[in-house]
Image (cartoon, rainbow, N blue to C red):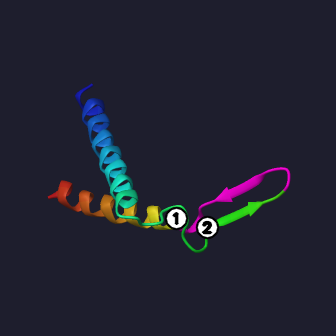
Amino acid sequence: MENIARHLMFGGIILFLIGGGVYLAAKFGIPFGRLPGDIRIEGENGSFYFPLTSSILVSILITIILNLLSKFMNK
C-alpha cells in the first residue's frame, strides 16, 4: 500500500509542475496552443482544432523530465 501511495504522490507532484509550467507560459505570453503547425479548421457548421505542434513539444518536454528523474531515482 505504501508503494501505491508513493506513486500517487509522485504523479501529483508531476502534474503540479506541469500545471505551473503552463501557467508561467501563459503569463509570459508564450503562444502555447497557437504554434505554427497546430491544425485549425473553421467552417460554417463548426470548427476543428488539433494542437499537433504543441502536443509534440509537450511530449518532448515530458520525456526529458522523466528521463532525468529516472536517472536520479536509480542512483
Circle 1 residues within 10 Å: few <14, some 14–19, many ≥20: some
Q: Residue furthest left?
A: 75
Front-lying residue, 44 or 71: 44
Q: Which residue is painted at 46% across and 62% down in the image?
A: 59
Circle 2 residues within 10 Å: few <14, some 14–19, many ≥20: some
On the rendered structure, is 2 left or right of 45? left
Could you tell me the amino acid type at mark 2?
Asp
Front-lying residue, 44 or 22: 44
Q: Name the residue carrying label 1.
A: 54
Based on the displayed image, in which of its 4 quarters is residue 11 positioned? top left
Asked if residue 49 is among those painted magenta in the image, a careful observer would answer: yes
Q: Which residue is painted at 26% across and 57% down in the image?
A: 70
What secondary structure is marked by label 2?
loop
Q: Which residue is painted at 31% across and 39% down in the image?
A: 12
Q: Name the residue carrying label 2.
A: 38
Q: Which percent across, then down, holds residue 3?
A: 26, 33
Q: Which residue is painted at 79% across and 50% down in the image?
A: 46
Q: Are marks 2 and 1 in contact (CB under 8 Å)?
A: yes
Asked if residue 46 is among those painted magenta in the image, a careful observer would answer: yes
Could you tell me the amino acid type at mark 1?
Ser
On the rendered structure, is 75 left or right of 71? left
Sequence-first tag of 2 and 1: 2
Residue extent of the magenta highlight: 44-53
